Amino acid sequence: MLEIKNLQVKLEEEDKQILKGVDLTVEAGKVHAIMGPNGSGKSTLSYVLSGRDGYEVTDGTATLAGEDILDMEPEERAAAGLFLAFQYPVEIPGVGNMTFMRTAVNSQRKARGQEEMSSTDFLKLVREKAKELKIDADMLKRPVNVGFSGGEKKRNEILQMAMLEPKMCILDETDSGLDVDAMRLVADGVNALRDEGRGFLVITHYQRLLDHIQPDVVHIMSNGRIIKTGGPELALEVEKNGYEHLKEEVA
Amino acid sequence: MALPQPKIDALEARIAGLTLPEGGWSEAARKDALSRLTAMGLPHARDEYWKFTRPAKLVEAEVTPATVLDEDEMPIFDAFDRLKIVFVDGVFDAEASDDLSLEGVSIDRLAESQDIHWAKDIYGVLETRGQDPVERSLAALNTAFATDGLLIHVHGKPSKPISVIYRHESETSDAVLHHVVKVDAGAEATILENGPAAARFNNVMEVEIADTGKLHHVRAQGRDHERRAATHVFARLGKESVFKTFTLTVNGVLTRNECVLEFTGDDAVGHVAGACLGDGDFHHDDTVFITHDAVNCESRQVFKKVLRNGAVGVFQGKILVKPDAQQTDGYQISQSLLLDDDSQFLAKPELEIYADDVACSHGSTSGAIDEDSLFYLRARGVPRGMAEDLMTIAFIAEAVLEVEDEALQEEINARVEAWLARRRD
């Protein structure tokens, strides 16, 4: 589904290499996790894939279902089926959550040459999905993420994911700022979306999220590279021994 | 102090073609206004109060022609049940207007009113009060030479808004209209104003609201890009009264909207708000002066400006709190969204407070569209242009929310959306 080859990325404003050749393939139907210490390049990877300004790809490729995404605008990547659940969802005062989601859903449908969803169908769908994530009507009415708690913001991300039905989901530290109950709710939301045709890339510092969203493959990232790949047991090893131990082992 | 010769010459040239209507109840007021005008002269670029807005096109002797639009592509307020009163190039159009009778309100025309009229106590009176401490000579010119206008006496609660519609059919029209609105105790009404009025438009509305009266004023200026307009609203608010005025401005090479509000009764509420969207050769000036001379009154000024391709926005807003106006709650915000480096926003917020138990705040900001928000919207599939439009509508929302009626809010947002969509790449 997502294929990254030798991806090298530097900051646009300064001569600082962040990703130094990342190779990663996430197959449809699989959940991959990336773990790694602060500053290892995990979030940069998610931003570069989703098309945020400020980064320059110096080498390598990234394709989504065979399509090169690195030259696409962020909205084109989204319409192609890429979804990034933000580590820090942005508050947008004045833009209603519903308006935002309906505009997003219909923009993507339009870009794919599909018919726009009617307001009635949209309302029905959003209410149904919101209920599963325990998002009340008030949260749907409020401006995007304004006045939302940390947990509410993350649930709102998952709701958008459920509404947009992407092919490839990247979750950037979705567990940060969540208590145990909120994490379970978010994880249930993600698990409900696990599907034969959909790939997941879960970025996290800690193993605990992976208790709830069980990965098929775990990668360890350090200093702009993936230094080790293994099964779920790799996450447990990190939890037990830390990253330093792994870095030494690889070195 | 004698007026300098160039100012005398400019004034003489400007009023050479105008005649002071004689007779009737307004004659004395008009003569007074003319003597005030003669003492003040017309605004000049060197006047402090006109520092940010060049008044030349508003005061020139010969009107610069303005192209007449073919048809209204989407007139605002059309879907609303309203009492329509139409002025074409400043001339009342009886055929296009509804019958002026409506329960709860009596409406006369300035040009046709009788020798004795209630408006005598207000006409030119509020304008005169508004001349201190800052001269507003265009308003004095208006009081002296206004050719027509509406005298609206609200004594009940009319079932629908009174809608003043301006039309522009002559390329060189120069309209001077003066409206007077009196709202009785317990009465409540909504007045709408919209449409291109003339190549040059000088409009004054004087508003007297008695204790517990309420008036909502919603105005839309747009489409006629080449117009030059100077408007003044002078309002005096009695005890527990409410006055809310909102103006949407899209396009316009030169618009100056002044609002002068005076609280004379306790516990009153006065809100002045505006949203403007300017693209290219656009200059929009909001100048507001609010005087608190009563206890526990609330004033709000909310102005939002969206500017691009070199458009210029100006805000001059002042709150004066007199010594006895305790428990005053004054709020003022003026913000601009600059969509490129060529556009400019000039703001002069002022507070002058002589009472010690007041809460007054003011803020003014200029900024671009927030990149993080833009990326968030785009990452969800919303194309850049549409994302910018959403952010723009969000930006002006605080001002639009000052319009009390939700249907009118929606109408305004729909107008703004249509304007943005037409300009989207």
Image: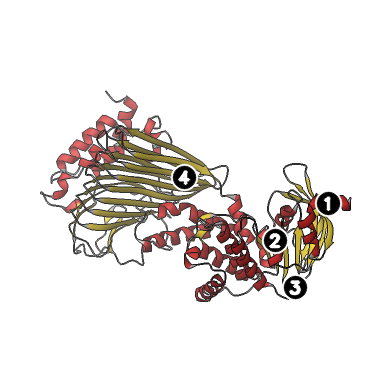
Q: CA distance from mark 1 to mark 4?
A: 53 Å
Left or right, residue B410 beside residue B189? right
Going by the numbered disc 1, the residue's amino acid type is His
Outermost residue on the top side: it is B1
Q: CA distance from mark 2 to mark 1?
A: 19 Å
Q: Can you tell which mark lies on residue A245?
A: 1
- Determine which residue is flagged by label 4: B335
- Determine which residue is flagged by label 3: A29
Going by the numbered disc 4, the residue's amino acid type is Gln
Going by the numbered disc 2, the residue's amino acid type is Arg
Going by the numbered disc 3, the residue's amino acid type is Gly
Q: Secondary structure at mark 4?
A: strand
Q: Can you tell which mark lies on residue B157?
A: none
Q: Are marks 3 and 1 in contact (CB under 8 Å)?
A: no
Q: Can you tell which mark lies on residue A208?
A: 2
Q: Residues within 10 Å of mark 4 (few under 14, many from 20)?
A: many
On the question of residue B151 being in view, the answer is yes
Q: Secondary structure at mark 1?
A: helix
